Image: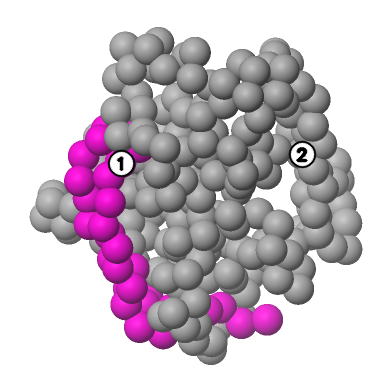
Amino acid sequence: MYERTIRIPAECSGVGLHSGASVNLRILPAPAGTGIVFRRTDLDNFEVEAVCRNVAKVSYATSLMKKGVLISTTEHLLSAFIGMGVDNAIVEVDNLELPILDGSAQPFIDMITEAGLRQQRRKRVYLKILRPYEMREGDKFIGMYPNQRYSVSYAIDFPHPLIGKERFQVELSNGSYVREIASARTFGFLHQQREMLNMGLIRGASRENCAPLFRRIRPPQGAGPNR
């Protein structure tokens, strides 16, 4: 298997889920071996690589930080890159938070599909799990185990009458990411809205970009709590 990048640039605009700020985003092709690099065009093109050493501890979002420069709410785009097999790309943004769009990875999937993919000459490097590895923190748990295939099993337990305990398992091959995961939307509990706003979060949230869960009403279609 060889590395891939997008064939032509793709772009979109929207608002940040937590900041509520307007933001423009552009995905550019990148040379083999680049990886995924975020570029803050509003800060003299400062670049933040999507690598583990740049992961920032920010609540309710997957965020990156380098030398004090933040790139927030990257999870849907990074998920789309993995799901579509994009190894190398430059992501230009002109604000600190990526646009939430409809609250799922699907708009990014559509952008990448329209732009097309180009195979590069460098072979992919894979991380091979040789023995089980597990980590626990309070009631949270994650584990990685040796396997010949790439599969994910995920379980949640929310104290909410519409969710409770759920389990989801998928083998990520043959387009299963696009079919099973990409359209899963951000969800939240309406009774926590005021608390989160007081924390400086969800200032850009709306019915168009997240699925609100009420105490006694079924979740909106596409909420996908466990996906």
Report x, y in % for residue 222.
Answer: 61, 46
> Which color scheme did the rendering employ for the protein?
one colour
Q: Spatial distance from mark 2 to mark 1, Cα to Cα?
A: 27 Å
- Type of the residue with mark 1: Gly
- Apparent side of residue 159 relative to residue 36 in the rendered image (left or right): right
For the residue carrying disc 1, how many other residues have a C-alpha within 10 Å: few (<14), some (14-19), or many (20+)? many
- Secondary structure beneath disc 2? strand
Q: Quadrant of the C terminus?
A: top right
Name the residue located 45 percent from the left edge and 61 percent from the top edge. Answer: 107
Residue located beneath label 1 in the image: 16
**Residue 159 visible in image:** yes
Compared with residue 5, is residue 104 higher up or lower down, i.e. above or below?
Answer: above
**Rendered position, 2 above or below 129:** below
Mark identifier at residue 36: none
Judging by the rendered image, the residue that carries numbered circle 2 is 154
Span shown in magenta? 1-30
Callout 2–callout 1 Cβ contact below 8 Å: no
Based on the picture, tell me whether residue 67 belongs to the magenta stretch. no
Q: Residue at x 55, y 44 (%)?
A: 185
